[in-house]
Amino acid sequence: MRIACPHCGLRDVQEFVYLGDAAPQRPDGLAATEAAMFEYVYLRDNPRGLLEELWYHGVGCRAWLVVRRDTLTHAIEYVGLAKSRKAGAAA
Amino acid sequence: MAEQAKSIWRPRSAWAGIVEAGQIGVDGKPGVTALTLDDMGFATLIVPPGSPDLASATKRMIGLDLPKKAFVSLSSTHGVAWAGANHWLLFARQQAGFVDLLQSFSDHAAVSDQSHARAALTVSGPRVREVLAKGAMVDLHSSVFPVGATALTSFAHVHVQFWRTDDGPDGPIFEILVPRSMAGSFWSWFAASAAEFNCRIDRD
């Protein structure tokens, strides 16, 4: 599998570190309930099909990326910089 | 009066004890040449997004354009390579005067001296791409990686930044930086990979 880094171009997946689902947003610190924090930290869907994920290009430009990947076929239909998404917006 | 402690610490090349000048592999005309670069100075420059003046400062102080992504600007004495978003690697061919230069740059960017943290090597020769291809995951063909291109990637699992300088009489020339602590591992891979093409090794 190769990922088209917006900075570096098409690179082997060995250069990247996988974090997981890009959707969860951290609840607002001390104001969050224990249940909301539990859900944010531990609970993840495991969808069959398209999923937006966070990947880190650690062996390249050291940027965090959002990758929309089909978990069934590994086909990637979008790669963008995570930082270009507004903080707090749905990822 | 107490005797002054005399330091036994001395600067030591990153390649000391690892690379020896000579020849490895088959006899005959070398297909690959490696030259250690022992006197270079390196520093990272990081600026906040949209910071305006590093480009003009770079032009003024070393006469080079701040490169766009994945490129390097080179002169006979200095260079500056793209090294990530809002991040560049500044280097000098000689360490003399480098600290003063960094002092000047510190008005325009966050500067971190990496001179003793990198081991640098020039590799060239008609077969050099075949050697690097044994460990590289990036395409080094001229159509993809022209003169002046740089990449952050890994060779044989060692993190590297490398770039392509002007071609020499024997074809392409690459300059490769590896973390100093990985110099031994890198050289082990390089020497084994280059031996079949006959490799001449020069020390700076």
Image (tube, rainbow, N blue to C red):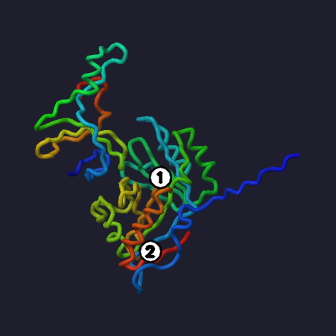
Q: Nearer the viewer, mark 1 or mark 2?
A: 2
| B102 horizontally vs A82: left or right | right
The image quarter containing residue A40 is top left
Secondary element at image label 1: strand
Going 11% across and 43% down the picture, which residue do you hit?
A: A72
Q: Is residue A9 above or below residue B173?
A: above
Q: Can you give x and y, in whole percent of width and height, for residue A85 in the image?
A: 28, 30
| B175 horizontally vs B4: left or right | left
Q: Can you give x and y, in whole percent of width and height, for residue B71 in the image?
A: 38, 54
User: Badge 1, how many Cα within 10 Å: few under 14, some, many 20+?
Assistant: many
| A81 horizontally vs B101: left or right | left
Question: Which residue was labeled with disc 2?
Answer: B33
Q: Amino acid at mark 1?
A: Val
Secondary element at image label 2: strand
Going 17% across and 36% down the picture, which residue do you hit?
A: A51
Question: Which residue was labeled with disc 1?
Answer: B80
Q: Which callout, 1 or 2, points at the residue further toward the start of the chain?
A: 2
Going 53% across and 43% down the picture, which residue do you hit?
A: B111
